[in-house]
Amino acid sequence: MTIGNARIQVDMVLDLICVHSYIGYTRLARAAERFRAGGGEVEIRFAPFELAPGAPTEGMPLIEALTQTFGEKTVQQLGYLVTEATKDGLELHYDRAIATGTFGAHRLVAQAAHQGRGEAMVERLFRAHFTDGLNIGDAGTLARLAAEVGVTAEDSGTEDSGTEEVRAALRLVREAGITSVPLFRIEGAPPMLGEQPEESLFGALTAASRAGSVIPSNEPDADGIRNSPLPDVQNHVQRYLATDGADGHDYYGFPTLLLTTRGRRTGRQIRTPLIYGRDGDRVVLIASNGASPKNPNWYLNLTADPEVHVQVRADKFVATGRLATAEERPRLWELMAKIFPKYDEYATETTRDIPVVVLESSGG
């Protein structure tokens, strides 16, 4: 593929103690390397996000902190994350990782970026936290890491250097409504939330390099059904459809189906991949939308028109969706939280009563 001398700007919102940010950045760096090898230029800019705003920098064992905050279920999920990270060539050592505040680390990234070393600094901070077990909230540790990367001592060692810049960037991120990371913005492409496949990131870079060639995000798929405008979701759906779920049903270790609803405003069919569970012959979904204060669009569509189309692997059927009854809800929530433990975490992070949805086959 000929890229020529295209110049693309990428903005990545991240936190340096977020494993999904680490995996996402690793894939972005590889996609950027391929793009640069083809003759293009990529500028990666970093915006700060704090998973634990105001957290102390003295540090404590990460597993202990996670257990206190989220309980044993979250800790049990760490093995899955270690396995996933290994696929990207990363080493995660949660047994020695340190929970800490990251404001100082974000300040160091900003300082390094001014010196043309932002990417190298981000990679080193991620590795220091997840692999080396260093406290990246500690000023002395940050100074040593800065020197290792080549960020000048006077910039990395002063307490006030870059402080206001980082505070302003954090405010902008909050005002933009960003509540989870990583988030990627590539010129000409819709925002990409979550750890993206390398191919999706590279595809977005190459699409951005061709002026006017980006496919409008509201274009329907070949079967007339619209998918999410996010490239990674589109990629997931296409792989699922092409293989009858052989590639796509087990998404990062979680069972996934394709749900098609009718848009409550447009009347258009919209397809969404979702984690699901089984309760006898019924399918169970959680309308989590992460920890967002708003219900997801697929749920709002379903409440307006409960007839939906479902694909589980190669099995396709019409179903009627409804809200779980008060009697059913506790049992079904427990069922789904065993499949995806972060649902329990989401429930503590939002004031919304997260809906539990039951799909019952209509026999069509």
Image (cartoon, grey):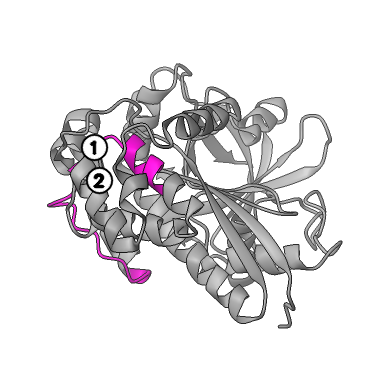
Element type at mark 1: loop
Question: Measured from the top left, where is residue 10 in percent x and y?
Answer: 61, 55
Residue 171 lies left or right of residue 220; in this view the side is left
Which amino acid, mark 1?
Answer: Thr
- Residue most extreme to the front: 154
Q: Is any part of residue 116 visible from this angle?
A: yes
Where 222 sits versus 40, above or below?
above
Question: Measured from the top left, where is residue 118 in percent x and y?
Answer: 46, 56
Q: Which residue is mark 1?
A: 100
Question: Measured from the top left, where is residue 21 in percent x and y?
Answer: 42, 51
Give the residue at x 66% y 26%.
303
Q: CA distance from mark 2 to mark 1?
A: 7 Å
Contact between labelled residues 1 and 2, with CB atoms less than 8 Å apart: yes
Judging depth in this view, the residue of 54 and 342 nearest the camera is 54
* Image: magenta residue range: 87-109
**The quadrant where residue 3 appears:** bottom right
The number of numbered discs placed on residues in the rendered structure image is 2
Q: Which residue is mark 2?
A: 136
- How crowded pointer 2 is (Cα within 10 Å; few <14, some 14-19, many 20+) is rated as many
Where 257 sits versus 290, above or below?
below
- Residue most extreme to the right: 212
Q: Is any part of residue 332 visible from this angle?
A: no
Which amino acid, mark 2?
Answer: Ile
